[in-house]
Image (spheres, coloured by chain):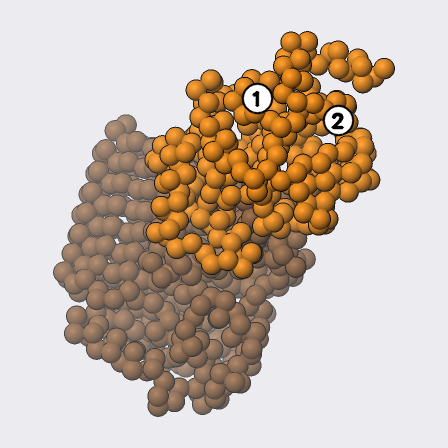
Amino acid sequence: MLSIKNLQVAIEDKAILRALNLDVGSGEVHAIMGPNGSGKSTLSHVLAGREGYQVTAGEVLFEGEDLLALQPEQRAHKGIFLGMQYPVELPGVNNMMFMRESLNAIRRARGEAELDAVEFMQRVREKARLVELDEQLLKRNVNVGFSGGEKKRNEILQMAMLEPRLAILDETDSGLDIDALRIIAGGVNALRSAERSIILITHYQRLLDYIQPDTVHVLVDGRIVRSGDKQLALELEEKGYGWIEAEAAA
Amino acid sequence: MSSTPDTVNDLISSGYEHGFVTDIESDTVPPGLDEDTIRLISARKNEPDWMLESRLKAYRHWLTMVDPEWAHVQHPRIDFQAISYYSAPKKKGDGPKSLDEVDPQLLDAYNKLGIPLEEQKALAGVAVDAVFDSVSVATTFRKNLADAGVIFCAMSEAVREYPELVKQYLGSVVPYTDNYFACLNAAVFTDGTFVYIPEGVRCPMELSTYFRINEARTGQFERTLIVAEAGSYVSYLEGCTAPMRDENQLHAAVVELVAMDDARIKYSTVQNWYPGDEQGRGGIYNFVTKRGDCRGERSHISWTQVETGSAITWKYPSCILRGDDSVGEFYSVAVTRGRQQADTGTKMIHMGRNTRSTIVSKGISAGQGQNTYRGLVRMTQRAENARNHSQCDSLLIGDRCGAHTFPYLEVRNPTAKVEHEATTSRLSEDQLFYCRQRGLSEENAVSMLVNGFCKEVFKELPMEFAVEAQKLLNITLEGAVG
C-alpha cells in the first residue's frame, strides 16, 4: 500500500531523514519508535504533505501513485489520515460541523454522495461511543477547551468517521493516562481491518501493549536502523535507545 | 522554517470582485464647492427655503473647521474642490434595457452572492418594464407600510412631504457642528432615507435600501434619519450585500436614529465598497457619522455592521443612552486586506440610570491591512448602575498586517461597571494544515475559520443577511486556489 524508497528530507538545508526505506502492506500495523529528534514527526508530516520540508531525494508511492506530488487535501481524499501529536484548536468552528464538512469533502472528491444530516448524526453518535467521547464535546468548537485526552480521542473519532486507508498516528499516546490510553487503543483496534494500514509513531513501548504491531521499526538519526517484531520494542523498553544508537553509529 | 508567507499571500491577494463600471449616463455638476453649488443642489431637489438655509448655515460653519487627523489612518489630503457634489442618473429609460446589456462581470458577482434574477435587474439599474416583479413587490410593500402608518421614503421626498417631522428631528442627534465630515454632509447631502414608525407600531417588514433602489440612487453624501416613536420597532438593513459601487473618492454619510420610550431600532449594515488596488490606489474613503439617541426610557438601539470594503473606513456607530434603562449594542466585523485601513468602533454614552451597553468587535486583518478598534465608553455622573461589556477580538492573517485597539473608558459614577476584554490571534499554518489534512480545500478552511471567528456578530444579523454576509466574506478572502 505504502512504499517509501530512499527518502531524504531536509528542513532549511538541514538533513532530517537520510535514506529512509519502508514498506507497509494492506492491513498491516507498523510501529515506528525512536528517540527525540530522530525524524519521526518529520516522516508523518512529509507523508501528509505539510509544507516547509524539502524532499531532496527518494520517492513515496501510495497504492502505486506518487504521493509527494499531491496536495495535503488530495492525500486526505486518497485515504491518508494523520492523527496529530498536537491537535490544534479551531475557535468558532463546531466540532460536528467540521467532521461533516470533512467527511463530505472527501466523499465529493471520490464522487460519492454526501451523507445527509440524519445519516451523519447516526454515524457520529455510534463512533463517539467507540472512543467514549462525551456527546457534549461534539457540540463544542473543535478542540477548544478539550483536555489532552479528549483531543486525542477526538482525533480517533475523526479517524473512525473518515475510515482512512492509511492512518498515521503521531504520538497519539503522549500525555495520556492509562485509562485514556486503553480507550484510544480500543478505538484503534476496532478500526483494524484487512483494507486499512496503520503506522503508529511512538516514543514508548507502553502503547504497543494495547495495540499489537505486526512490525516494529527503530528510527535513529533519520534512518531505520532496525526492524523486528514486538520483541524489539520490549528490548528497547529494557535497554533504552542508547545501545541501538551506539550500534548504528558503529 | 515553513513557507507560510507564500500560501497566505496567495490567499489574500485575490482581486476586487466588483470592480466593474456601469455606463449609465448621469446628470453631474462640475467639481467644486461654494454657496452656489449648495443652492444648485437644493434647487435640483426642489427644496423649501428652510432646508436651503440650513444647508448654508452648515456650509458657513464648515468653512471654519479643519479636517481631523486623529484617526489611525493615512491618506493624502482631500481636495474638496475636486469633488462633484451632485450626480444623479438620467431617466431610467437611459439605463440598460435588459440584463443582456449589463456587464457580465456584474452579473457574475450577483450570482456569486446568490441574488435572485429580479433583484439583479433592480440592482443593475435595468429599465423597468411592465412585468418587472419588483414593481409589484414594491407596491405591495408600500401598501403594507402605509396601512401600518409607517413612513419610508427618500430624504428629499421627506423634506417636501413631511417638513415638520424633518425639522424636528434632522440634526437633533448629529448637529451640523458635530464634526468636519458631518458638517459637510449637512451642507451638501444629496439623498438618503427617512423612516418614521408611529407609536406602538411594529414595522411589518425589514426595511432595506434595496426596495428604493430604482427610485433614487443614493449619492455619496447620504443622510438617513429613523425615528421610532414610543413602543415601536423597526429593523433597517443598509447596503444589502449587493456590490455597492461608488465612483467617488469620498463618502461622508450621516445616520441619525431616535428611539423614544420602549422603542427598539435594529440597524444592520453590510458595506462592500471598492477598496482600491493592491498598491493602495483608488478606493473609497468611507467617513461616516452614525449615532443613535435612546431618548426614551427602556429604549433599545442595536448597530450591527460588516465592513469589508472601502480603502479607508472611519466610522463609529454610537449610542447615547439618555433614557433610564435604555440599551445600546454594537456588533462589528471589519475586514481589511491589501492596503485597506479601518479605524472603526463605537461610542456608548451612558447618561440614564441602569443603562446597559454591549460591544462586540471582530477585526480581521490580512495582506497589509490595518485594522483599528477605537471605542469610547462614558459613564456620566447620573448613570447609576450603568453597565458595559466590551469584547474586541483581532484575527491576523499573514505577517504584514496590523491590529490596534484603542479603548477609552471614562467613568464618573462609582456604581457603574465597565468590562473590557481583548484578544489577538493569528490564523495559523497549523490550523490550515489541520483542515486540509481532513480533506478541506485551503479556501474552505480559511472561510470556515474566519466565519467561526465572526459567528457572534453574524448571529445578530437578520437571517438572509447573515447568509449573504458570510458569502461576501468568502468572496473577500477568496483566492487561495488558482
Looking at the picture, tell me which residue is in the foreground, B438 or B201.
B438
Q: Residue at x 51, y 43 (%)?
A: A163
Task: Identify the image quadrant of the N terminus of chain B.
Answer: top right
Residue A208 is labelled as: 1
Answer yes or no: do the residues labelled 2 and 1 have beta carbons within 8 Å?
no
Give chain B's shade: brown
Q: Give the CA separation, mark 2 to mark 1.
A: 18 Å
Q: Residue at x 28, y 27 (%)?
A: B414
Amino acid type at image mark 1: Leu
Q: Chain of mark 1?
A: A
Give chain A's shade: orange
Q: Where is mark 2, residue-wise? A: A224
Q: Residue furthest front?
A: A194
Q: Residue furthest top?
A: A239
Residue B214 shows in this picture: yes
Mark 1 nearby-residue class (10 Å; few <14, some 14–19, many ≥20): some
